[in-house]
Image (cartoon, rainbow, N blue to C red):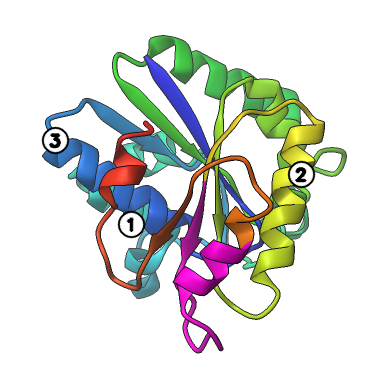
Amino acid sequence: MTTVFIAGAGTEIGKTYVTAAIVRRLRADGRDVRALKPVASGVPPMGDPDFSGSDTAQLLAAQGIAVTAAAVAACSPWRFAAPLAPDQAAALEGQAPVLEDIVTWCLERMEAATGTLIVEGVGGLMSPVTQEATGLGWLWSLACPAILVSGSYLGAISHALTAYETCRAADIPVLAIVVNESTGAPTPPETVAEAIARHAEVPVIVIARDAPCPDALAALI
C-alpha cells in the first residue's frame, strides 16, 4: 500500500487536475487507486448545477464513481460551500474542524487501503485547515511523502521553492514538484520547471494544460 499527499505551493493552481490525471493514468495502467479530498471548500450542494465542477466531483469522475450522497461523503467528509480557507468557510456554517479528527480519518483509510491512496490537500501548503493547524501540520501528521503542485504564473518559482524548503525543514519527503501550466503565464511551463529544478533536489515535471499524466510522474507513485 502506498499513500501520497498532493500539496499545493498555492491555491487554485491545479492540484485537483493533477490528482485526477494521476488517478486516470494509474487506472489505465491497471493499478488499484483511490483518491480522497478530505477537506474541501468551495463545494456547492449536490443539487446545485455547479457541483459537477467541484473538486470532489472531479475526483469521483476520475475514479469512475457515480455521484451519490454516500460517495461524496466518502471522498470529502469536511466540505464547505464558501470558496475560502477551510477554517473560514467552516465558521460561516457554524463548524470548527479539528485536525486530530481529520488525521484520524485519513489514517484509517490509509490502513484500509489495498492499493495506492492519493490524499489531496486543500489550498496551499500553509493554508489554515483548522483554527489551529495548517496544511503542513496535516501532512506532517500523516507521515507520508508529498508531491508538490505549482503553477507557471509569475511568482510560481518562488512559491514552489518556498513550499519545497518548508517540507524539507519539516522532514517531509517530496517525491516531485509538478508544474501545472497556468493560463496567461508569461513564460512556458518548461522555463519555470527548469528554474525550479536548479534549486531543488527532486524531479520537476511539467503537465501542459489539458495534458494527461506524464510517464515520469506515474513512475514515481
Q: Considering the numbered disc 1 on the image, is that residue within a helix, a strand or a loop? A: helix
Which region is colored magenta? 177-195
**From what the image shows, is residue 2 above or below residue 155?**
above
Question: Residue farthest to the top?
Answer: 111
What's the mark number on residue 58? Answer: 1
In the picture provided, is 191 more to the left or to the right than 18? right
Q: Which of the two discs, 2 and 1, labels the residue nearer the N terminus? A: 1
> Is residue 203 or residue 62 the one in the foreground?
203
Q: Residue at x 37, y 31 (%)?
A: 221
Q: Which of the two discs, 3 and 2, labels the residue nearer the N terminus? A: 3
The image quadrant where one finds the N terminus is top left
Q: Residue at x 46, y 79 (%)?
A: 188
Q: Which residue is identified by label 3?
A: 29
Discs 3/2, front:
2
Q: Considering the numbered disc 3 on the image, is that residue within a helix, a strand or a loop? A: loop
| Residue 180 magenta | yes
In percent of width and height, residue 152 lies at 55, 73
In percent of width and height, residue 169 lies at 82, 33
Discs 3/1, front:
3
Numbered circles on residues, count: 3
In percent of width and height, residue 176 lies at 51, 42
**From what the image shows, is residue 180 above or below residue 39?**
below
Q: Amino acid at mark 2?
A: Glu
In the picture provided, is 99 more to the left or to the right than 153? right
Q: CA distance from mark 3 to mark 1?
A: 20 Å
In percent of width and height, residue 44 lies at 48, 64
Q: Residues within 10 Å of mark 3 (few under 14, many from 20)?
A: few
Q: Residue at x 40, y 20 (%)?
A: 2
What's the mark number on residue 165? Answer: 2
**From what the image shows, is residue 48 above or below residue 93?**
below
